[in-house]
Amino acid sequence: MILSEPEVREILNLIWESVYGKLQSNATEKDWLKYQDTAFNRVNMVARWLTRSPGHWIPKPHIYFHPNNERNRFKKTWQWYVKQETLKIEIRNQLLLQQVKSEWQQHEQNKGRFREKTRLQLFRIQQKRLAGYRDESLNQAYQQCLQRCLHLKNLKRKQPAYAQ
């Protein structure tokens, strides 16, 4: 899309007003840079969506960034962005928990890279690795996964010889 100089100025003014709130916030420079990165991610998210679905309609920039446009404006991408980031975290957590479970299973079979470690050492290694993510829900899920892994092991030990 080729825009004239007045159109570009109008669009930039609309972005300044609708996206940045005319910079009236008392945010620090660091906060503004973080917001800028998030805004770029939101724009890139829309661009990727349009690349995958070229037939979809998107309003022209002077409409898309207009502060009074309630139907299909830039601010609506915030919910979309939050949903996408939440999904990324959930998938990351699932993969980490699968890795933890696999490490415990390999440890019980004397296989894997932690076969020489004690159960306590393996627990500490995993705990340290997961603490780096600073995610309370991940830590809670890890505790549940750990209880399931160790509980299943204890059940296997308690079975009488004739039941095997």
Image (cartoon, grey):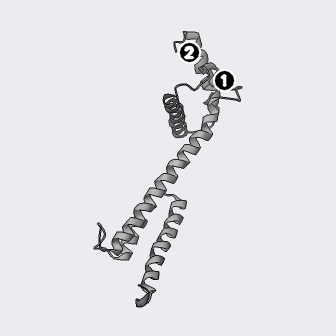
Tell me residue 24's x, y (percent). 64, 32
Q: In the image, residue 109 lies at what x, y percent?
A: 32, 74
Is 10 located above or below residue 86 in the figure? above
Quarter of the image containing the C terminus? bottom left
Tell me the residue at 52%/69% (across/down): 144
Vertically, is 156 above or below 95? below
Horizontally, residue 116 falls left or right of residue 11, namely left
Q: Which residue is mark 2?
A: 8
Q: Are marks 1 and 2 in contact (CB under 8 Å)?
A: no
Q: Quadrant of residue 106?
A: bottom left
The residue at which mark 1 appears reads as 66
Q: Residues within 10 Å of mark 2 (few under 14, many from 20)?
A: some
Q: Could you tell me if residue 130 is visible in this image?
A: no
Disc 2 element: helix
- Mark toward the start of the polypeptide (1 vs 2): 2
Q: Is residue 134 visible?
A: yes
